[in-house]
Image (spheres, rainbow, N blue to C red):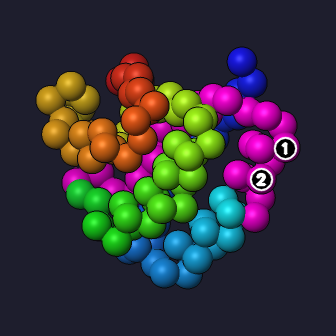
Amino acid sequence: MRVAIITDTHWGARNDSLAFIDYFDKFYTNVFIPKLIEEKIDTVLMLGDTFDRRKYTNHVSLSHAKRIYFEPLERLGIKIHMIVGNHDTAYRDWETDRKSTRLNSSHSRASRMPSSA
């Protein structure tokens, strides 16, 4: 197993700023994903705060996250393991948080791991 670790991506930062989305696109397309391929990474650990807002995710930011990050990793067969961060859940009890289900259809090889509160 070859693992890459990433954290605090904060998709939707700065009120879903298109400048940030453009930066994310350039980073993942030109740096992160090519490095995963070069290093033959087969698993990515996301250590929390995948999205920026606790209460909701803008559909535009979610769409960009899927297109720029989750779908390319799925096409490459890279597994994703996610720890739920404090920005990824609207409630203290993550199991009751319906928001965390927003990624269920993003990547067929993704799993979520609860973080300790």
Where disc 1 sits, the SS reads: helix
Q: Which residues are magenta?
A: 30-55
- 54 over 93 or under it: above or below: below
* 47 horizontally vs 64: left or right: right
* Residue 33 visible somewhere in the drawing: yes
Q: How many marks?
A: 2
* Residue 87 visible somewhere in the drawing: no
Q: Mark 1 is on which residue type?
A: Glu
Q: Mark 2 is on which residue type?
A: Pro
Which percent across, then down, holds residue 10? 48, 56
Which percent across, then down, holds residue 58? 29, 67
* 64 horizontally vs 36: left or right: left
* 35 horizontally vs 105: left or right: right
Write down the residue under mark 2. 34
Tag 1–tag 2 contact (CB < 8 Å)? yes
Quarter of the figure with the N terminus: top right
Quarter occupied by residue 79: top right
Q: Give me the residue at 75% from left, 43% from top.
A: 36
Query: Which residue is situated farthest in the bottom direction here?
Result: 19
Write down the residue under mark 1. 38
Which percent across, then down, holds residue 20? 55, 74
Q: CA distance from mark 1 to mark 2?
A: 6 Å
31 inside magenta stretch: yes
Q: Give me the residue at 24% from left, 40% from top.
A: 101
- Nearer to me, 74 or 31: 74
Query: Which residue is situated farthest in the right direction here?
Result: 38
